[in-house]
Amino acid sequence: MSEFYSSTIGKKFWVSLTGIFLMLFLAIHLTANLMLIFDDTGELFNRVVHFMGTNPVIRIMEPILAIGFLVHIFLTSILTLRNQTTRKQGYKKQKLGNASSWASRNMYILGTVILAFLIIHILNYWWKFKFCEMPTTSYGGQEMEDGYMVVSSLLQIWWYDIIYIIGFIALSYQISHGFWSAFQTLGWSDDKSRKIWTVLAYLYAIIIGVGFSIIPIYFLLK
């Protein structure tokens, strides 16, 4: 069993498993973030953030999510570098283009862009929410941190919005390949169902990319 997990197939298994976990997290994260544009008072978003910050189940999931991110990034980097070093020289670009999508051929570039964006995102939001002094507000006598003020003020900076949109466009491209690839690696896809998984992959990638990009665009147009 240990040989399986240390093998290339084993690494792909963990990449697929953590990838599906992270895609589920993205759906939840998008749902929470859309509260930013559904309620201009900020109450809805702040209540969601307060719930997620105080709910014991979610707080337990935070370190699991962090480990999932690290494992996914580490193993994906290993597999990508291995593919690049073992790729035969002189491989025809035309043949490569017919055999794979642009996203699958540029996963390392996309991953680098996403990692850079993730670091910026963590420093500007997660770090501030966890370790910095936050402005507060109250609703019905219940005091809570005013996350809406922190997020909305940052999303009114046009150059940060561009970084934000580029980051999620890169993520969408990666999802468009990683979605169906994950299910294929886990053995949940065959020749008949692959077309369905591929369509679902593009659909989910579009939802994530457009959904997250709408938020900075909304604040720019306000």
Image: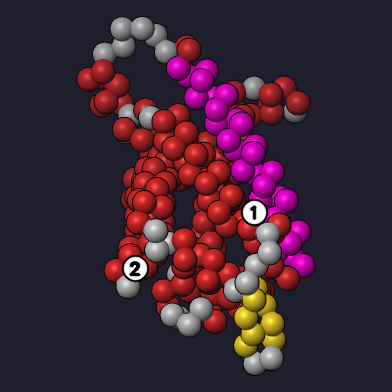
Could you say where residue 201 lies in the image, as x and y percent from the top left? Answer: 39, 49
The numbered disc on residue 189 is: none
Residue that badge 2 annotates: 218
Q: Secondary structure at mark 1?
A: helix
Q: Is residue 78 magenta?
A: yes
Task: Answer whether residue 84 is visible to the viewer in this image.
Answer: yes
Left or right of 170, for residue 94: left
Give the CA distance from mark 1 to mark 2: 24 Å
**Which quadrant of the figure has residue 206?**
bottom left
Q: Secondary structure at mark 2?
A: helix
Relative depth, front residue between 14 and 52: 52
- Residue type indicated by callout 1: Trp
Could you say where residue 122 lies in the image, as x and y percent from the top left? Answer: 58, 50
Q: Which residues are magenta?
A: 55-84
- Residue type indicated by callout 2: Tyr
Could you say where residue 3 lies in the image, as x and y percent from the top left? Answer: 72, 22
> Which residue is located at x 30 percent, y 21 percent?
96
- N-terminal of the two: label 1 or label 2? 1
Compared to residue 51, the image places residue 17 above or below, namely: above
> Which residue is located at x 73 percent, y 71 percent?
54
Left or right of 143, for residue 116: left
User: For mark 1, does the 10 Å Cα neighbourhood hold few (<14), some (14 to 19), or many (20 or more) residues?
Assistant: few
Residue that badge 1 annotates: 127
> Which residue is located at x 42 percent, y 41 percent?
174
